[in-house]
Image (cartoon, grey):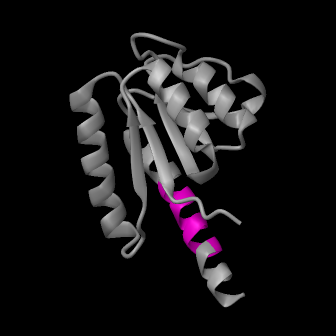
Amino acid sequence: MILRDTILIADDEPLALSTFIEVFRNRIGRTLPGVDFNVLTAADGDEALTTLESNHEKLIAAVFDDRMGTGPLGREIATRAAELSVPSAVFSGTTYDIPDGQYKVFEKPTGRFDLMDWISGHLQGRQKASSRELLL
């Protein structure tokens, strides 16, 4: 069994991306001490899709800005993530219907902490799975 330990975060705004990662790491450090994880980033839709497809086996979660300049929309990449069994979320300025509930949508700007809680839940699940593996 492959232990998933990586999160993919894709946003075309470098400052927003780096700020989100820094705040997220600080929050996880406070709420889940001892949990270790990697973060992969992508700066546009094409890079996000390529990163998702080449790393999906180790991803515990993926987060996409809905509009990332070039390439597919975040919601299109999230649909692909669902096909690859990667839990994913889209951070969007507008709300819309989710096809078959394949991914979670968080509305800008108020959804950032809800999004962090969503990712934290996946990290906690990974930590529990890791503990079970050690017992076996």
Residue 109: name its quadrant: top left
Where is residue 2? Give x, y as percent.
65, 62
Q: Residue at x 33, y 51 (%)?
A: 24
Magenta residues: mostly which secondary structure?
Answer: helix
Where is residue 80? Give x, y as percent.
67, 28
Seen in the image, is 57 located left or right of residue 22?
Answer: right
Seen in the image, is 43 located left or right of residue 50?
Answer: left
**From the viewer's perspective, is residue 106 above or below residue 30?**
above
**From the viewer's perspective, is residue 35 above or below residue 42?**
below
Where is residue 57? Give x, y as percent.
64, 50
Q: Residue at x 37, y 27 (%)?
A: 11
Question: Does residue 123 show up magenta in the picture?
Answer: yes
**Residue farthest to the right, as pictured:** 100
Seen in the image, is 29 located left or right of residue 2?
Answer: left
**From the viewer's perspective, is residue 60 above or below residue 86?**
below
**Residue farthest to the top, as pictured:** 70
**Residue farthest to the bottom, as pictured:** 135
What range of the chain is rendered magenta? 120-129
Residue 108: name its quadrant: top left
Where is residue 27? Give x, y as percent.
32, 59
